[in-house]
């Protein structure tokens, strides 16, 4: 598989992007990467740590920043690293694309350059979050669509289930993010989405309160992008806060340090289990090609995970499976 990677997208580009690409090709021998951006700098960074031929560079001069209006930037900056990443994918020179750049620009390019799958009303951003029972929960949508109709939320649940089946071979239990477990709870959008999901042909198991997001009782949680983004960042912030408090407590006394030393293997395993960076970025699901949006602050580890995630999407034919499912429901 060939994955096109936006070499200048994200807060830590291009150094961490290049490191992530090198980690990814070392992880999978059948993977090759096309980096887009300023050729001289990217090639110099690649050669510092990698001597193979599975990372190539496509030269382009411009960069789209997070301060720019996304649609306007996509239309005007044709020689930007992000636009060239999309073009490589659409022209068949790559099998998937990854960027840690502007979320708005990635979504705009996904819709206007790559195009939506027929029948999909709105693409969704779907990150995977680790659960306490192992495995992951796909949060669909986590920020692509702030104002939603019930039909959109229902489709997010369906696409999330198709994602989990294609990538992890999981017959997904689909929940609906709500402020209570009862079917009568929620605003009008959520109440109508509840009814639609019950009749959508997925294994809909009811409402999911935010406290149960990582419980392992759900494989997919459908929601609008506003609530999903808040839930995602709340979960990330809580995890970071817990580990910070644990570190402070461990350093508070000699006895605590001694106990932590004895528990080090268990604590290391816990941190790895709850580390969302292990699971890549957010899949942009509902467009015609495999696309992953990594967090803007991603370091090499997260970039590598996002590349492998995109590789899995391409290998498992996720786009074709969504297209077939939505065609069958027309």
Image: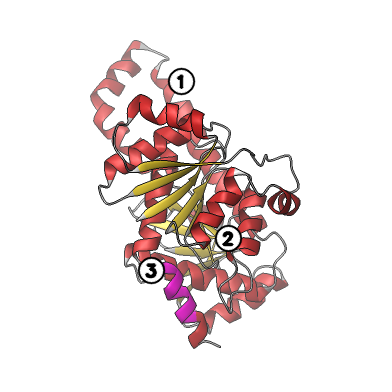
> Which residue: 54% across, 31% down?
12
Which circle, 2 or 1, is nearer the viewer? 2
Main secondary-structure element of the magenta-colored stretch: helix
Q: Secondary structure at mark 1?
A: helix
Task: Determine which of the numbered discs, if any, sits on residue 79 in the image.
Answer: none
Q: Are dots 2 and 1 in contact, CB under 8 Å?
A: no
Report x, y in % for residue 77: 69, 47
> As drawn, is 49 to the left or to the right of 75?
left
Report x, y in % for residue 206: 51, 72
Q: Secondary structure at mark 2?
A: loop
**Which of the marked residues, 3 or 2, is nearer the chain's N terminus?**
2
> Which residue: 43% across, 47% down?
306
Marks 1 and 3 sit apart, C-alpha to C-alpha, by: 46 Å
Task: Determine which of the numbered discs, if any, sits on residue 248 in the image.
Answer: 1
Depth check: give the residue in front, 330 or 127.
Answer: 330
Q: Is residue 51 visible?
A: yes
Q: Which residues are magenta?
A: 318-325
Q: On the image, numbered disc 3 is attached to which residue?
A: 317
Q: Is residue 157 above or below residue 9?
A: below
Q: Are dots 1 and 3 in contact, CB under 8 Å?
A: no
Q: Secondary structure at mark 3?
A: loop
Give neighbour class at mark 1: few <14, some 14-19, many 20+ (Cα, 10 Å). Answer: few
Q: Is residue 294 above or below residue 156?
A: above
Marks 3 and 2 sit apart, C-alpha to C-alpha, by: 21 Å
> As drawn, is 97 to the left or to the right of 253?
right
Q: On the image, numbered disc 2 is attached to which residue?
A: 141
> As drawn, is 25 to the left or to the right of 220?
left
Marks 2 and 1 sit apart, C-alpha to C-alpha, by: 34 Å
Depth check: give the residue in front, 124 or 265.
Answer: 124
């Amino acid at each position: 598989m060939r994955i096109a990677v936006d070499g200048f997208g994200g807060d830590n580009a291009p150094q961490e992007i290049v490191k992530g690409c090198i980690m990814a090709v070392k992880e999978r021998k059948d993977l090759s990467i096309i980096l887009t951006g300023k050729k001289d700098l990217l090639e110099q960074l690649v050669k510092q740590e990698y001597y193979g031929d599975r990372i190539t560079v496509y030269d382009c001069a411009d960069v789209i920043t997070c301060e720019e209006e996304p649609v306007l930037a996509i239309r005007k900056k044709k020689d930007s690293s992000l636009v060239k990443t999309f073009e490589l994918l659409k022209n068949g020179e790559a099998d998937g694309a990854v960027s840690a750049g502007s979320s708005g620009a990635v979504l705009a390019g996904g819709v206007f350059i790559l195009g939506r799958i027929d029948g999909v009303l709105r693409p969704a951003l779907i990150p995977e979050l680790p659960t306490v029972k192992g495995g992951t929960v796909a949060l669909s949508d986590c920020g692509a669509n702030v104002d939603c109709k019930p039909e959109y939320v229902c489709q997010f649940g369906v696409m999330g289930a198709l994602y989990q089946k294609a990538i992890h071979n999981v017959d997904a239990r689909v929940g609906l993010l709500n402020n209570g477990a009862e079917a009568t709870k929620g605003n009008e959008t959520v109440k109508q989405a509840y009814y639609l999901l019950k009749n959508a042909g997925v294994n809909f198991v009811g409402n999911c309160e935010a406290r149960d997001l990582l419980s392992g009782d759900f494989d997919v949680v459908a929601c609008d992008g506003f609530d999903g983004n808040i839930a995602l960042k709340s979960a990330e912030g809580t995890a970071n806060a817990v580990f910070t408090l644990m570190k402070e407590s461990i350093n508070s006394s000699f006895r605590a340090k001694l106990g932590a030393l004895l528990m080090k293997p268990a604590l290391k395993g816990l941190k790895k289990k709850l580390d969302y960076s292990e699971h890549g970025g957010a899949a942009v699901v509902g467009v015609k090609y495999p696309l992953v949006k990594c967090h803007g602050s991603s370091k090499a580890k997260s970039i590598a995970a996002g590349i492998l995630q995109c590789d899995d999407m391409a290998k498992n034919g996720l786009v074709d499976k969504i297209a077939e499912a939505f065609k069958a429901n027309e």
